[in-house]
Image (tube, rainbow, N blue to C red):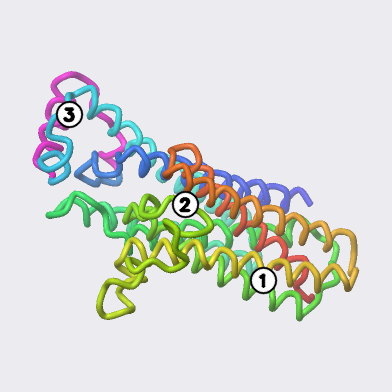
């Protein structure tokens, strides 16, 4: 039991740090701080500028970037320090996450505390974490060439990979937390799995909305400036481009798809609760329904109030909790 407790603490610490990283990543994006560090170095990048000369040198490097030349050309050193702080903090949490994972992993390996299954799962987590770091720099690089803006595709991959990594980390931890076997239901499990796929698509489109600033396209609800489907939604040619490149088409998809998810979770809840498998199963479904309804409500307010900082950040964090709730529901409805 002590062995499991140590591993559980390790895995849940990883989940908590990923959550913090998503929070800081959201702040970094919303404060437009993501392109403030124009170099990437795994070890030397951990040391920030320590004196006025180093700060000036770092600022001079930033002045060569497209973002400074085209957008922030009037920034002072103090302005630069503010945006540098958020990107630096984001990267440092990533480094801390790596240490929190690898040091206990080596200890558990040395003490032979990991089963074969746990070892494979841990190695996969390590791969996902390393991949996430590489994707992060790949994303930042897209904004350091010509356009002072990161690719919304790369932003979506970066965010979704973080969510999937945390979801898998929680999935590995849950069987260690709940030792007793829980009665499952294959049909409900498959429905929740489908819901999880739909939510991942919605998370990708949420990143598209963020990356293209599509949230400020139409700021009325339920109609979009008095129309259900404005012409701007399908103005690009060919038609499919509206939903991968067009800000208006992407916002339309994101806000419409939310109600498909709401309808589907209501269907799952009605179906699952009518079976009355156990109070634990019912509570899990009610929790998931509540989070999805809250997320939809926050999404509506975010649009109507023209994407204020606080609501945009809360919207991203609830998306994170929504996916973790789906993982928990998948676990308890899984047939053992």
Q: Is 212 in front, or is 335? A: 212
10 Å crowding of disc 3: few (<14), some (14-19), many (20+): few
Helix, strand or loop at mark 1: helix
**Main SS category, magenta section:** helix
| Residue on which the image places disc 1 | 264
Q: Which residues are magenta?
A: 43-65
| Residue on which the image places disc 2 | 220
User: How far apart are the two marked residues, 1 and 3, measured between alpha carbons?
Assistant: 48 Å
Q: Residue at x 80, y 76 (%)?
A: 185
User: How far apart are the two marked residues, 3 and 2, measured between alpha carbons?
Assistant: 34 Å
Work out whether 77 lies above or below 213. Answer: above
Work out whether 14 lies above or below 122. Answer: above
Name the mark on residue 246.
none
| Residue on which the image places disc 3 | 75
Quadrant for the C terminus, please.
Answer: bottom right
Left or right position of 110 against 63: right
């Amino acid at each position: 039991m002590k062995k499991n407790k140590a591993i559980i603490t390790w895995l849940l610490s990883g989940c908590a740090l990923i959550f913090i990283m998503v929070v800081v990543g959201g702040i970094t994006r919303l404060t437009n701080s993501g392109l403030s560090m124009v170099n990437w170095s795994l070890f030397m990048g951990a040391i920030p500028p320590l004196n006025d000369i180093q700060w000036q040198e770092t600022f001079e490097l930033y002045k060569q970037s497209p973002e400074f030349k085209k957008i922030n050309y009037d920034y002072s050193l103090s302005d630069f320090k503010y945006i540098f702080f958020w990107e630096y903090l984001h990267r440092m949490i990533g480094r801390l996450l790596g240490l929190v994972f690898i040091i206990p992993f080596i200890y558990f390996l040395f003490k032979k505390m990991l089963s074969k299954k746990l070892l494979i799962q841990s190695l996969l987590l390590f791969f996902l974490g390393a991949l996430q770091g590489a994707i992060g720099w790949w994303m930042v690089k897209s904004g350091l060439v010509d356009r002072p803006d990161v690719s919304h595709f790369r932003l979506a991959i970066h965010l979704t990979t973080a969510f999937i990594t945390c979801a898998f980390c929680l999935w590995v931890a849950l069987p260690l937390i709940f030792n007793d076997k829980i009665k499952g239901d294959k049909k409900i499990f498959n429905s929740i799995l489908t819901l999880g796929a739909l939510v991942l698509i919605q998370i990708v489109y949420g990143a598209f909305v963020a990356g293209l600033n599509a949230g400020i396209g139409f700021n009325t609800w339920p109609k979009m400036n008095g129309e259900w489907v404005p012409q701007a939604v399908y103005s690009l040619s060919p038609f499919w481009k509206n939903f991968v490149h067009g800000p208006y088409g992407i916002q339309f998809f994101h806000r419409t798809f939310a109600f498909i998810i709401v309808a589907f979770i209501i269907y799952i809840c009605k179906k699952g609760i009518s079976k009355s498998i156990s109070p634990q199963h019912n509570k899990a479904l009610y929790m998931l329904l509540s989070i999805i309804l809250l997320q939809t409500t926050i999404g509506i307010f975010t649009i109507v109030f023209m994407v204020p900082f606080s609501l945009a950040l809360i919207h991203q964090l609830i998306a994170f909790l929504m996916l973790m709730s789906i993982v928990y529901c998948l676990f308890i409805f899984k047939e053992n």
